[in-house]
Amino acid sequence: MLIINYILTIYNDQSKIYLATSDENTIFQVVYKVSQKAIKNQESIEIIDTMALYCSENISLYSTWNKEAKYDALQATKENILSKSKQKVTTYAYESFVSNLNDKNNIGVWTINWEMEDIFKDRVSNSATFIYKDKDEGWIKAVENIPLQNWDIQSDTMTVLGYKCQKATTAFWGRNYNAWFTLDIPLHDGPWLFSGLPGLILRIQDTEGIFQFTAVGLEQLMTPMTLAVDESVSYKTVTLKKYLALKKNRRKSVQYYSYENNVLYIADIYNPIQFESLYEEN
Amino acid sequence: MNRAIVTFTFFLFGISCYAQTEIKGKVLDNKKRNPIVAATVILHPVGLQDILTYGTTREDGSFVLKKAGLPDSVVISVRSMNTEPFSKIITSNIDFVELNVTEKAIALNEVIVKPVKIRQKGDTLNYSVSSFVDVTDKSIGDVLKKLPGIQVLSSGKILYQNKAISKFYIEGLDMLRGKYGIATNNIDASKVATVQVLENHQPIKVLKDMEIPEEAAINLKLKESAKGAYFATLQLGLGLPFWLFNNELVGMRFTRKQQNMLVFKDDNTGRDIAQELVSFYDNTRNLGVNFLSVSKPGTPPINKQHFLFNNANVVSMNNLYVINKDMTLTGNVNFLYDKQTQNGFSERQIFLTNGQKVTIVEDAQNQLLKRELEGNLVWESNLENKYLSNKLRAIGKWNNENSMLLPSSSSQNNQSLQSSQINISNDFEYMFKRHRQQYRIGAYAGYVSQPVSLSSSPSSLAEIVMNNPLVDSVMLQDVRYRQFSSNAYFSGGFGEKFIISH
């Protein structure tokens, strides 16, 4: 028996028709462990996140890894908190927040400990698109031409994930970086805004030792995926400067919450953790 | 001052003239001569791994390499994700070089990292679909089969820890009312983020903490990208022998306020698409009685798809509206048209000790025509202290079944069964809670009308009665069954319980 199937999927919201064909560009996924030194109450701590780089021929996306599940967990926590409360009391000082509570042991911290930003890098136009959902402003987008990093390739080698890597150094936006790339994976990409080496960057760190990106996973994705900005969402387009200011502002505060007798108590206070940003000093 | 500037300009000019070597070139596939895009082109010193300079190819496969002070000959190498590594020695004063490479997807050593597959939070188990899905999985039903603890029977029924699930939700809403085969067969696995198993699930909020059922429920959490969008999938299949077809048109939309699913299927390849319309909630009562039947050939012990010769059409329309947070209105209309033919032949020979032989032949041709229409309208209000539901349901069935025994012999026997059914019922339920006491009021009314007639010819019984071999004898059986039943109850908690029903 011979059966010929034509599968046609229509996404009405975007008024676009995608034909799912088998020879769609394969997408290569690199998972990076991203660690960052930060200071909390005068103590040095390390913040770790897992990011994914999705590479196609000309466009790559750098976004938090396993995003659906992370959003899901976030949504579940939010729904859980809201379902238990009929009234909301917000305070802006931790002391007055605590004084409202009878049970001081049942305090949760409402933080998002993963990077919510998506960065699309376009190799042809040499631009980057930054996308982020701000609590007050909604979806914001910034498109910026990114200066190419000038890499100085050195002869040192190191093995990362079983790949022989070569060292390269660059100065970018106020920091100096040491990168390790491999010629065996001929993708000109890397985590965050790093790109332009003759092979994939598997490890990169700044010379002060604050930021470090290390590849922990490499995979050729079998499920077709389109690397493009989701046009079904309406974005507020801002300058990169404004965009970074909004993002920075968001990290300044942290929310503690607790519920008692159907009342949700929230303390919206300064984040005790002091971060440095990859974007600062540019 | 003037002289100084002039000198400086000359100096710069001198540099660019003397040392900047520029090598232009193109990378092409050596068979079709297509340009290779985004390939890395690197210059190495001969015999060394050092990188002198590098570049990438553009959309037309071209590249430009610039470098001061190159040795006389260099190795130029090309690497890309879909070509074999290529290198050759060139002289560095060459202006243009064409590099012909062999197209081949390169295999990389993958290091696969997997997210946590199952998360448990209270009574809810979350299975992350992306960690269980693979390329061969089309619908979410394919993924469900792989989840630990979940079992999908060949009928489509879902079991969790060997118990049938009590509810099947999509985004927390029960649109399909037990006919969840429509969802498991038609919702694309790539649209579902998480499959949740809600253990000891109590769907009625009033009964929460009062009655804890053993059964679990399943909830599909869709991906953010799948929420609110219209999805339409059209699948056309045509096959041989002349003509096998399986056509599907599925449309769906899930939002916070409403859910819709429309399924239209048309199939004669032996896939039992009628199965999608089977309800797996056992809340059906008063479904009528089977009075008469015709003889049927036995079921062979092979996969149903290989002996089912049918021509089936299925239409299923399902809509759910969220009136407010706790109130929903659900409407379902399902129609099935199924024409099946069966031919059965079996011969058994028994050799007796006295040399005689007894041959038993069974030869039958059956034709079955099913036309079934079902409509459901459910209004449900599910609050913390009060539960109200009203289910209105109407079923119409018009079925014909013909059976011909020994079609090729003189003792041919024809049987024909015509059965139809009209079934209308309304089920009302009200529950409320006051001071931890629970009260229930319910009313049910249902009407079934079921005329059935069976004719059989020739009838041996008729021959005896008529005693006239010249007349064609036909036996006719007619059953008319009508039933109306209603019942109402109230149960309250003064330690006493009384039930009124008639």
Image (cartoon, coloured by chain):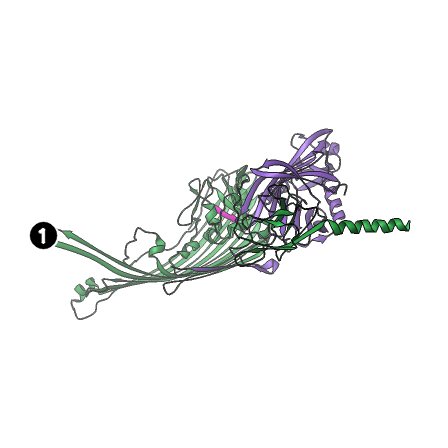
Chain colours: A purple, B green
- Dot 1: element: loop
With A28 as the anchor, is B19 left or right in this view? right
Q: Looking at the figure, which quarter contains the C terminus of chain A?
A: top right
The answer to if B168 sits in the magenta stretch is: yes
- Residue depicted at 42% across the width and 48% down the height: B157
Residue placed most toward the observer, B423 or B42:
B42
Disc 1 is attached to a residue of which chain?
B
Give the residues in magenta.
B165-169
Q: Is residue B364 visible?
A: yes
Indicate the position of residue B489 as horizontal and vertical percent values.
46, 47
Q: Kindly give the residue lying farthest to the right in the view shown.
A: B1
- Up-down relation of residue A88 to residue B370 (above or below): above
Q: Looking at the figure, which quarter contains the N terminus of chain A?
A: bottom left
Q: Is residue B315 visible?
A: no
Badge 1: few (under 14), some or many (20 or more) residues near its Cα, within 10 Å? few
Q: Kindly give the residue lying farthest to the front in the view shown.
A: B72
Q: Kindly give the residue lying farthest to the left in the view shown.
A: B354
Indicate the position of residue A100 as horizontal and vertical percent values.
71, 33
Indicate the position of residue B329 as horizontal and vertical percent values.
54, 54
- Residue depicted at 59% across the width and 37% down the height: A160
Name the residue tied to disc 1.
B355
- Up-down relation of residue B160 to residue B177 (above or below): above
- Residue depicted at 30% across the width and 58% down the height: B293
The secondary structure that most of the magenta stretch takes on is strand
The answer to if A204 sits in the magenta stretch is: no
Q: Name the amino acid, label 1.
A: Gly
